[in-house]
Image (cartoon, helix red, strand yellow):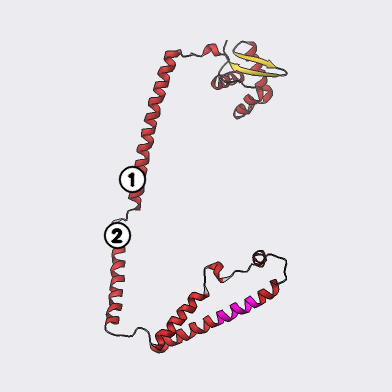
């Protein structure tokens, strides 16, 4: 007589049949914790089911391996297996087609989401018109000969730039002299020592003194011409 489905034996039997693979008591107990079944209760249920012939078992030393009875399952013949393989292939093709269709729809959604709304287009158009108008006004001033920067302001800026570049050059030279004196007889690798101290050269941060010196010389030539 089959155990009730809500009894411990019924729950264990249902689990063994659903798994349809070799199981030991620990496998079953771990999986059936969700039913609040202890390992001892699962062991008793497995042994009772095996004794009643409702499941199969084999002993390997001190361990028992339990398995669902195979005579309760309908085993397909060769023709049925071929038909199942054919159906599986058709389902795989259908799944691939569905995935492709889903990808195309998702791509279309992303495209639509990336497009600007009418409100955003109008706002951007208004901003561009304002920028164009501002640039046109600046162009008119330049064409009419209006000086946008006073000569004295320009000279003050150039003089300040000249001073800053000279200070930069002096400090760079001073650092090199001090660094050479420190590292001349040091056994440490200079690169490692620099990293250890947390030092960075201008070049390490993408800044080159030569480019500013050339800009300074270019300004001098324009002032003399």
The number of callouts visible is: 2
Where is residue 217 shown, x and y percent of the image?
Answer: 46, 82
- The answer to which of 202 and 6 lies nearer the viewer is 202
Where is residue 41 shown, x and y percent of the image?
Answer: 67, 22
Numbered disc in front, either 2 or 1: 1
Q: Quadrant of the C terminus?
A: bottom left
In which image quadrant can residue 123 be found? bottom left
Where is residue 181 shown, x and y percent of the image?
Answer: 69, 75
- The answer to which of 161 and 114 lies nearer the viewer is 161
Gap in Å between the C-alphas at discs 2 and 1? Answer: 20 Å
Local crowd size for mark 2, using a 10 Å CA cut-off: few (<14), some (14–19), many (≥20)? few
Find disc 1 in the rendering and name its residue: 108
Callouts 2 and 1 close, C-beta under 8 Å: no
Q: Quadrant of the N terminus?
A: top right
SS under mark 1: helix
Find disc 2 in the rendering and name its residue: 121
**Earlier sequence position, callout 2 versus callout 1:** 1
- The answer to which of 175 and 12 lies nearer the viewer is 175
Q: Main secondary structure of the magenta part?
A: helix
């Amino acid at each position: 007589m089959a155990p009730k489905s809500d009894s411990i034996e019924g729950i264990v039997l249902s689990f063994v049949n659903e798994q349809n693979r070799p199981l030991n008591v620990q496998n079953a107990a771990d999986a059936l914790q969700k039913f609040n079944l202890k390992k001892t209760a699962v062991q008793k249920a497995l042994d009772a089911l095996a004794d009643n012939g409702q499941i199969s078992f084999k002993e390997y030393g001190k361990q028992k391996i339990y398995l669902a009875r195979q005579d309760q399952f309908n085993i397909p013949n060769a023709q049925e297996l071929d038909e199942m393989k054919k159906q599986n292939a058709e389902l795989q093709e259908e799944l691939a087609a569905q995935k492709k269709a889903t990808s195309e729809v998702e791509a279309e959604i992303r495209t639509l989401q990336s497009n600007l709304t009418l409100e955003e287009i109008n706002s951007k158009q208004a901003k561009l018109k304002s920028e164009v108008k501002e640039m046109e006004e600046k162009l008119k001033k330049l064409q009419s000969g209006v000086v946008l920067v006073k000569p004295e302001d320009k000279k003050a800026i150039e003089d300040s730039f000249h001073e800053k570049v000279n200070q930069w050059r002096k400090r760079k030279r001073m650092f090199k002299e001090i660094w050479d004196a420190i590292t001349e007889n040091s056994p440490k690798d200079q690169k490692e020592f620099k990293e250890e101290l947390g030092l960075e050269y201008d070049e390490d941060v993408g800044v080159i003194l030569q480019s500013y010196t050339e800009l300074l010389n270019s300004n001098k030539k324009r002032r003399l011409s």
